[in-house]
Every structure is written in C-alpha cells, then in structure tokens.
Amino acid sequence: MIIDSVEVETINSFSKLELLKEVYGLISILPILTLLLGITIEVLVIVWLEREISASIQQRIGPEYAGPLGLLQAIADGTKLLLKEDILPSRGDISLFSIGPSIAVISVLLSFLVIPLGYHFVLADLSIGVFLWIAISSIAPIGLLMAGYSSNNKYSFSGGLRAAAQSISYEIPLTFFVLAISLLSNSSSTVDIVEAQSKYGFFGWNIWRQPIGFLVFLISSLAECERLPFDLLEAEEELVAGYQTEYSGIKYGLFYLVSYLNLLVSSLFVTVLYLGGWNLSIPYISFFDFFQMNKAVGILEMTMGIFITLTKAYLFLFISITIRWTLPRMRMDQLLNLGWKFLLPISLGNLLLTTSSQLVSL
Amino acid sequence: MKSFSGSNPHLSVFFSVCRSVSKEHREESERTKWALVMSEFAPICIYLVISPLVSLIPLGVPFPFASNSSTYPEKLSAYECGSDPSGDARSRFDIRFYLVPILFIIPDPEVTFSFPWAVPPNKIDLFGSWSMMAFLLILTIGSLYEWKRGASDRE
C-alpha cells in the first residue's frame, strides 16, 4: 500500500503509545459478545412482536402465558426445541444435513459486522462494508441447497432448489440498488453512507434520492428472507415445509432463527442505506449544542444513535410483519418473472439514471 | 484509516523506501503495517471463529436429553404425508432450476466489477463512466437475448 512519509511518522509515534500490539486482537472480543447478546435480545423481541402483531391483525390474543405479556415466548420455544430429539433421516447425507442450517446461520451472523449503530460504533469499519454484506448473503443459498439435498425427501429437494433459485434471483436487483447508493455516497463503507445522509436532516435521506430503490430494496429483501408474499417454500399447502421438512429440534430452531435474523439484518440495512442511520433527522438542528459536558455527551450520543437506528429498523419490521398477513402468496413462476424480467431492467435503468445525474453534477 | 493515496505515489514510495533503509526502521514499518491490517481485520477474524461456535454448539446440546430413535425405525424414513415414500428422492428435476444459477453467474460478476467503478466518480470523469457503460451494454444485450429465447420463462 502507498503510505506518505508524514503518515509513516504519525503511525510510528502512534505505535510507540500502544505497547501490546499482539493483544489488540483479543480486546475486540468484548464488543463481539455485546453484539451477540444484543442480537439474541432482538430476536426475542422480533418473535414476540411478530406474534403480537399477527394476533392483532387476525383479531385474536397472542402469547400470554410465557412470562409477562408473553415476552418470554421465544425463550420457551427455544428451550423446547433444544430438548427435542435430533432425527437424522436414514439414507440421507448426515454431514451435509447437520451443516446446512449452520451455514445459513453463519452467513447471516457475519452480516452484523458492518452495521453501524453510531459513528464509532461499528464492529468493522471496512471500506467495502455493504459489499461484504452482499457477498456473505450469497452464501446462505448454499446452506439451503445442502439442507434440501441431504434430506433424501422429494419435497425437501424441490424446496431447496426453489429456495436457492429465489434467493439468487433477487440478489441481483438488490445488489444493483446497493450499487446505486454507493454511487450516490461515493463510498461502499456503511459509516460513510450514513454520514452522506446527515447534511440536511430529514431531507437528506437517500429515500428521496432513490425512491424506486427503496421500494425495490423492500421487495427484494422480503424475497431474500423468504417471507410472504414470497413464502412459497414454507407454505404447508405446497411443499410441506420445503427444505425444512426433515428437520427437528434445534436444527429446525436454527432455520427459524435464520429467518428472523435475516429480517433484522435487512431492516437494519434499510435504515443505514435509505433512512439515514443513526442521525436524528430534524433538519438544521444539532441536538448536542445544548450540552456542555464532554464525556456525558459521548455516552448520550451513543445511546441516542442506537435508539434512533433501532426505531427506524423496527418501522421496517412492522411493515414486513403487516405485509405478511395482508398480501397473498406468489407462485414460483410469478416470483421468478418478477425478479428477472421486472426488477432487473428497473435496476439497470436506475443505475443509468443515477450515473447520469452524478455526471451532470460534476 | 481507509485510504492512503498520496498525491505523488512514486515519491512517497521513494520516501518510505528511504526510511526503511536501516534495519530497525524496516522492522518497525513492518510491524506498523501488520498492526494496521490486524486492527482492521481482527474483529472479523475473531467473529469468524465465534459465529460457527454459536451455530454448532446448539447442535450438540440435545445429546444428553433426547431419546433414542432406534426403537422406531419409521421415524427415520422420509416424510410423505403418512404413506410410504415412493421412488427415489434424488431422481430427475426440472432443468430450469439448473438454468437459473447459470443465468445468475453472468450478472453477479457484472455487479461485482461495477462496485470499484461506482465509488470514485470524480476521479474517473466522463471517460471512466462511458467505458463502464460499454461493458454494461454488452451484458445487457446478452440479457435481452436470453429473454427473447425464453430461458427465464415459466418457472
């Protein structure tokens, strides 16, 4: 890499301050564990939210027995699944069968690396942040294919193939729109993308500069998460449970987890890419001019950042859950036609428009 | 710490080489480069170790609790809504499920190659954008051909 002489001097002086360079890696375990704890709590909240909102839409009462207001329902489900017997199908490929759900979980968990909840509050501030998410989310269909093939069940196999076809068909419009956002923000780093939206408050959000992108990103991420209206793989009338048919116990729990984690990652990316991330979006007001103390402002800023990001993410989660219970399911060929013949030309056209607007403003 | 592009790359390389002439300077710059790379990628490496653990440890938890299925061999056969499984599960499948990933292979590197182009538009000016447009045009012609020939039709 090309380093200036001035920067080499500053780096040398900086290295003299830090004595334990080899131990630097180990210190970052604490943020990772905090993140995993946060993810677990969020999954509990999402499962509870989904059940409560579904119950309200269907005019019935949701979970109410496990903990106050049914809040511990997800823990109850998880514990039950942990204690169930692990059935391995005869004549199925046992190693692939076991690894399938794990690969899907790993790929979704790795996407949390680049999500910023504050200015310095991101696990890995890579300059290729969003691209890392796109690349890693391409690994999930491999896990689904493994699960479907190794179950030795016609319905699982068919479900696995369809799941992989659906996932990869909607990845391309998704990536093209993320590319358009990168074009607008001149960077692929998630922190830079949020910073580029912070100038004019509410009116600086990328949703106003890429409205088609917002809608298509919503549709594509619902398709990637395999939620209704793209729910064909889990529909009981169609394929029993698709690639999850032969799974029981905690492996089924891992697929369940993948579904909700994927939804959470997509919601967080919608807020980062389109809704302005951690910025309090009241235009032209800087919230922290009122405070004089330095250290307290740092912690307050961090808390506000997390709170704002999560509020915006939960807005998208609410929209997804409501869509699940209002729209009918799409057929497989309608699904693939939508992905290849409708969204892909729109994404190319949007890229062209964005490029020309960038060139005109140069 | 995202990019270190100097205004004159050859001059800065010359300076850094001059600085690294003496052995201890060379060792120190090696250590600082290693430190930079480590500080950016250390969380990723650790997370890469922790997340497989998080997903694989729950697979081993049921072993002390769960019952044995050797007494009920019907539990282990393939599920087909109650009846005995007919035919082999790994028989033929629709060729279109093979075709969709092949058709995915083309736009996937297209987008991957577009990412380095999208980020610095003020450095590549008009010439850079138009050359990328030529690339996208060739691939769009391919996609149109595939559409017309019906490769993405009917499931």
Image (cartoon, coloured by chain):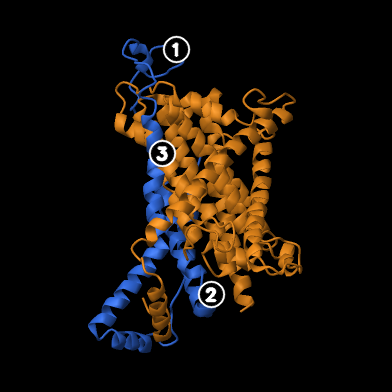
Dot 1: few (<14), some (14–19), or many (≥20) neighbours within 10 Å? Answer: few
Q: Quadrant of the N terminus of chain A?
A: bottom left
Q: In which chain is the residue bearing label 3?
A: B
Q: Relative to residue A161, is residue B133 depicted above or below?
A: below
User: Could you tell whether A200 is left or right of B131 in the image?
Assistant: right
Q: Which mark is residue A118?
A: none
Q: Which is more N-terminal, label 1 or label 2? A: 1
- Tell me, yes or no, whether dots 1 and 3 are on the same chain: yes
Res B82 label: 1
Circle 2 — which element?
helix
- Give the label, 3 or 2, closer to the camera: 3
Q: Along the line of sight, which residue is nearer the eye, B8 or A250?
A: A250
Same chain letter for marks 3 and 2? yes
Work out whether residue A213 can be spotted: no
Q: Residues within 10 Å of mark 3 (few under 14, many from 20)?
A: some
Disc 3 marks a residue whose amino acid type is: Ser
Q: Quadrant of residue A146?
A: top left
Query: Quadrant location of the C terminus of chain A?
Result: bottom right
Q: Residue at x 46, y 46 (%)?
A: A109
- Residue assigned mark 2: B121
Please report contact status of discs 2 and 1: CB closer than 8 Å, yes or no. no
Could you tell me the amino acid type at mark 1? Gly
- Specify whether A25 is left or right of A171: left
Q: Which residue is mark 3?
A: B55
Q: Tell me where residue A111 appears, x and y as whole percent.
A: 48, 51
- Real-space Cα distance between discs 2 and 1? 61 Å
